Image (cartoon, helix red, strand yellow):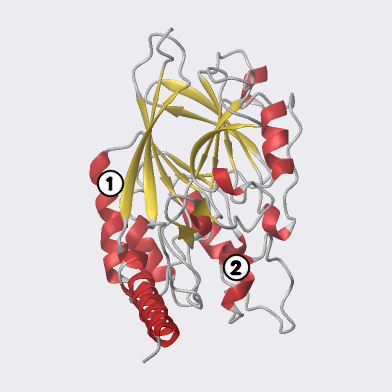
Amino acid sequence: MSGAARATGALAAAGAGALAYASLVEVRWYALREVTVPVLPAGQDPLRILHLSDLHLTPGQRHKVDWVRDLATLDPHLVLDTGDNWAHLDAMPDLMDALEPHLAVPGAFVLGSNDYIAPMPKNPARYLLPDARRRPAAPPTELPWRELVSRFRSAGWVDLSNRRDVLKVDGRVLSLVGTDDAHLDRDEFPAAGGPDDARTGGTPVDLHLGVTHAPYRRVLDAMHADDVDLVIAGHTHGGQLALPFWGALVTNCDLDTRRAKGLHGWPGPRPDQPGGAGSTWMHVSAGLGTSPYAPVRFACRPEATLLTLVPPAHG
C-alpha cells in the first residue's frame, strides 16, 4: 500500500472515530458550568441563577430529563429559560417532567424558533453557514407553544417575550426586559420608561436583567442601550461543532464566534479590560440539545449554567 493510500485510510478512520464520538458520546455528556458575575450592588449576598437553554427535547430522552431535574439540587434563587425547549409534537410530557422541580422556583422565560415550529430534515452542512435562516420549501409543523406558555405562566414564571416585568427574589427587586425570538424576526424591544419598567417606580431596583433566545447584535445593542446589567441568551449551541484550541465555527446568528458561549462583554470586553469601558455583561449558553436531524456535538459539550451574581471586588 502506498503512503498516500495509508494516509487516506488513516484520515478516514479518524473521521469515522470523530463522528462516532460526536454522535454517541459528547452529545449526551452534559456539563454544569459555574460562572461568577460581579454585578450586584455592594454589600449584597450572592444570587444564584440557573440558566437553561436549548433542550430540544424529544420523547424518550430519559437521561436528559433526569439530568435536568437533578439541577434543582443546586437550589437556585431564580431560573431563566432562554427557549428551544423541545423538538417534537409529543415532547410535552417529558418536558414538563424535566422542568417540574424548577417551576416551583421563581423564573422567567422567552421562546425560541423551535418552541414555535418543529425542526425539519435539512442538509447538516447548513450549520456551517453564518446564519442558516433560509426558510424550508415545505410548510413547518407548528408545535403547541401556546399551551407551553400557559403552563409556564400558570406555574408563576414570567413571560418576557417583548415584555418588561419585575420579580422579587431572595429579598431583591429584579427588573426584567426580554424579546421574542430574533431568529424568526419576532423581536420588538419594549420601550423604556413606561408603566411596565420597574425602574420608574418608587421601589429601588437591585438588578436589571435582559433575556433573549438568539443573541443578534440588534437585540444586544438595544439591551446595552437600556442599561441592562446582564444579558442572558442561548440559541448558538456554542457552535455545536467546534475545533479544539480554536472554538466555534458558526453561531447561527450575527454574533461573532469568539462569543458563541460563555461570559463576555457587549459590545466589547468588560470595563476592567482594555478597550471595554461601558460594556454590558453577557452570558450565552451552549445549551443542552441539538436538532434531532443533526444529533452531534464536537468539542462543545451540552451544558446548563449556574450563574452566581456577586458585588464587584472593589465594591
- The image shows residue 134 at horizontal and vertical percentages of 74, 70
Task: Name which residue type carries label 1.
Answer: Ala
Residue 9 figure quarter: bottom left
Relative to 78, residue 195 above or below? above
Q: Indicate which label's residue lies in the foreground, 1 or 2.
A: 2
Q: Position of 96 compared to 250: left or right? A: left
Helix or strand or loop: what does disc 1 sit on? Answer: helix
Q: For this rendering, which residue is in front, 111 or 287?
A: 287
Q: For this rendering, which residue is in front, 150 or 44?
A: 44
Q: For this rendering, which residue is in front, 146 or 25?
A: 25
- Quick one: label 1, few (<14), some, or many (20+) residues within 10 Å? some
Helix or strand or loop: what does disc 2 sit on? Answer: helix
- The image shows residue 253 at horizontal and vertical percentages of 66, 54
- The image shows residue 205 at horizontal and vertical percentages of 55, 18
Residue ID for mark 2: 127
Do labels 1 and 2 touch, CB within 8 Å?
no
Q: Position of 303 compared to 181: left or right? A: left
Residue 287 figure quarter: bottom left
Across the whole image, how many numbered discs are drawn on residues? 2
Q: Residue at x 71, y 60 (%)?
A: 184
- Quick one: label 2, few (<14), some, or many (20+) residues within 10 Å? some
Direction front: furthest residue: 2
Q: Which mark is residue 192?
A: none
Residue ID for mark 1: 72
